[in-house]
Image: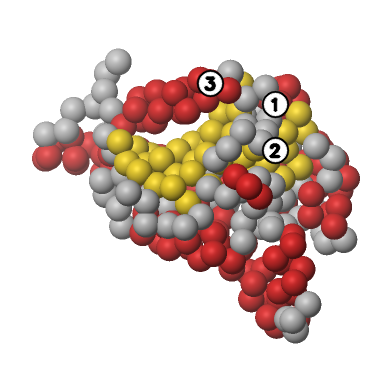
Amino acid sequence: MSEFETLKYETRDHVGLLTLNRPQSLNAINETMLGELETFWRARRHDAETRVVILSGAGDKGFCAGLDLKEAFTQMAALDLAGFYNAQSRGARLMLSMRQAPQPIIAAIHGAAAGVGLSFALASDLRLITPDARFAASFVNIGLGGADVGSSYFLPRLIGAGRAYEFLLTGDFMDAETAFNLGLVSRVVPRDRLLDEAMELAQKMCRKNPLGLRLTKEAINCNLDAAGLEQALNVEDRNQTLCLATIRYEGQNPDTR
C-alpha cells in the first residue's frame, strides 16, 4: 500500500515501482509531490532490499508535464527572490537525489515529458519510451532559461552538445524517433508493453551481484566528471576488488547468462 498522496509505490522481487500519480494534471509536480519525492528518494539511499527502481507516469496522457504552473505562479507571486531560490533549489535537488540513489532507475515514458518531466527522464539511468513519447525543455517557453533542473548538465552528455543547444534554446519538442536516433533512449516499445519491458530489464539487473550493480552506477556518476583516465581507472579497480570480495567471502554467484 502506497503511503503517498501524489505517488504510487510498490515493490516486486527487489524492484521498486514508482508512479507519478496526478493523471488529471498530466502528473505535473506540485508542492505535495515535491515533498513526497524528497521523502521517497531519501529513503532509497539506505534501502538495501530495492535494487532497481522503475519510474513511470499514471494515466493515458503522458509521463509528466513538468511543474504545475497554476499552483507555481500563485505561490511565486507571494515569494521574494530568496524564497523563489529556495523553491527552485528544492526541485533541482531532486535530480541530485536520483543520481545519489544507489538503485539504477529505469524511466518508462509515454506521451509528454516536459520541463521537470524531461529532467526526471534525464536523471534516470535508462529510458524506455512509447512511439508517442516526446521531450521538451519547456522552461524557455515560459520566460525562464532553457537550462534548468539539470537539463544543461544531462542533455549534452547524453546526446552531444550540438543538438542539446538546439533543444535547450528553442524549447522545441523532440519526438520518439529523434530521441532514439540521438541515443537519448534505449528502446521504443508499444504502449501495452512498456512496463513489461521495463520489468524484464529490471529483473535482468537484479540477477547481478547487488554490490556490482550499485558500484556500476556509482562509477558512471564519478567518471562522467572524472579529471582523466587514471582517475576513472582507479574507481573501476576499487569497485571490481570490492565485488570480488562479495563473491569470495559472501558466496554470491555472478549471473553468467
Residue 192 position in % (x across, y down)? 53, 21
Q: Nearer the viewer, residue 29 or 84?
A: 29
Residue occupying image coordinates x 48% and y 51%: 7
Camera-near label (3 vs 2) is 3
Circle on res. 132: 1
Any part of residue 236 in sight: no
Residue occupying image coordinates x 34% and y 28%: 203
Look at the picture and state if 44 lies above or below 203. Answer: below
Q: From the image, tell me which residue sits under label 3.
A: 192
Q: Nearer the viewer, residue 73 or 215?
A: 73
Residue 159 position in % (x across, y down)? 71, 35
Residue type, numbered disc 1: Asp
Which of marks 3 and 1 precedes in the sequence?
A: 1
Left or right of 214 in this view: 113: right
Tag 2 secondary structure: strand
Residue occupying image coordinates x 56% and y 55%: 95
Within 10 angstroms of label 2, few (less than 14), some, or many (20 or more) residues? many
Q: Are marks 1 and 2 in contact (CB under 8 Å)?
A: no
Q: Are marks 3 and 2 in contact (CB under 8 Å)?
A: no
Which of marks 2 and 1 precedes in the sequence?
A: 2
Residue 255 placement: quadrant: top left
Residue type, numbered disc 2: Ala
Residue occupying image coordinates x 66% and y 50%: 25
Circle on res. 112: 2
